[in-house]
Image: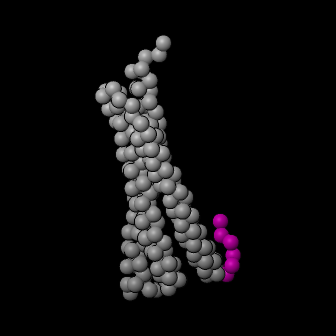
């Protein structure tokens, strides 16, 4: 014969797996937000250098300023998407913890929990899925800005290679 208390405990712990996943996503998303913020700061500092007298003499300064100006709106979009994803993950954690609390409270009160825990768990899982979807969009934006920057670096390399008469140097 099964102990009903153990069944309640097992039902309360089940959302913990999703809570753990949401926590991991929150940590990595927080890191992504920090990296995007740092990148904005780097680009801002570089732009300030480029608009200065000495920076304007830098090879391809105009092109680099254009590249920076194209990247800033994308970085703004990235940070907004990351913030929305983090909000979704925090909401998921809250809903999943609430699921466990409703199950536990129902057992303590000796009443049937009804559909509330299932509804809360579905909403929590939906919030997790939404956050993950947002991160997939953010990843594409991140890749796009990286590819653009690499293209500029190739252009800069070709400029410097031209200074040496096209000779390849080791």
Q: Residue furthest left?
A: 109
In the image, is residue 61 above or below residue 106? below
* Towards the viewer: 60 or 105: 105
> Any magenta on residue 169?
yes
How many callouts does the rendering have? 0
The image position of residue 53, as x and y in percent, is 38, 87
Q: x%, y% of residue 6?
A: 42, 21
Residue 128 appears left or right of 152: left
Magenta-colored stretch includes residue 64: no
Q: Residue at x 44, y 57 (%)?
A: 85
Relative placement, left or right, of 163 versus 123 is right
Quadrant of the drawing holding the C terminus: bottom right
Residue 34 image offset from top left, x and y in percent: 39, 58
Compared to residue 94, the image places residue 86 above or below, namely below
From this viewpoint, is residue 157 visible? no
**Most foreground residue, 101 or 169:** 101
Of 96 and 143, which appears nearest the observer?
96
Residue placed farthest to the top in the image? 1
Picture residue at 32% right of the left edge, 32% below the top? 105
Magenta stretch prevailing secondary structure:
loop
Magenta range? 165-170
Residue at x 39% of width, y 31% of height: 112
The residue at the point 42 percent across, 66 percent down is: 80
Task: Tell me the quarter of the picture where residue 30 sits.
Answer: bottom left
User: Is 9 drawn above or below residue 169 in the view shown?
Assistant: above
Give residue 37's position: percent from left, percent from top.
39, 64
Give the colouring mode of the picture: one colour
**Is residue 138 at least partly visible in the picture?**
yes
């Amino acid at each position: 014969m099964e102990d009903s208390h153990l069944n309640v405990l097992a039902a309360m712990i089940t959302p913990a797996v999703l809570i753990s996943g949401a926590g991991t996503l929150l940590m990595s998303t927080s890191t992504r937000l920090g990296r995007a913020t740092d990148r904005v700061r780097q680009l801002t500092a570089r732009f300030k250098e480029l608009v200065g007298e000495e920076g304007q003499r830098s090879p391809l300064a105009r092109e680099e300023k254009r590249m920076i100006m194209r990247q800033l709106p994308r970085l703004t979009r990235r940070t907004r998407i990351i913030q929305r994803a983090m909000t979704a993950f925090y909401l998921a954690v809250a809903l999943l913890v609430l699921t466990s609390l409703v199950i536990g409270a129902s057992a303590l009160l000796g009443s049937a929990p009804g559909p509330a825990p299932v509804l809360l768990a579905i909403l929590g899982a939906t919030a997790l899925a939404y956050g993950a979807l947002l991160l997939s969009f953010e990843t594409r934006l991140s890749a796009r800005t990286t590819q653009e920057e690499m293209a500029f670096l190739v252009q800069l390399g070709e400029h410097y290679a031209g200074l040496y008469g096209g000779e390849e140097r080791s």
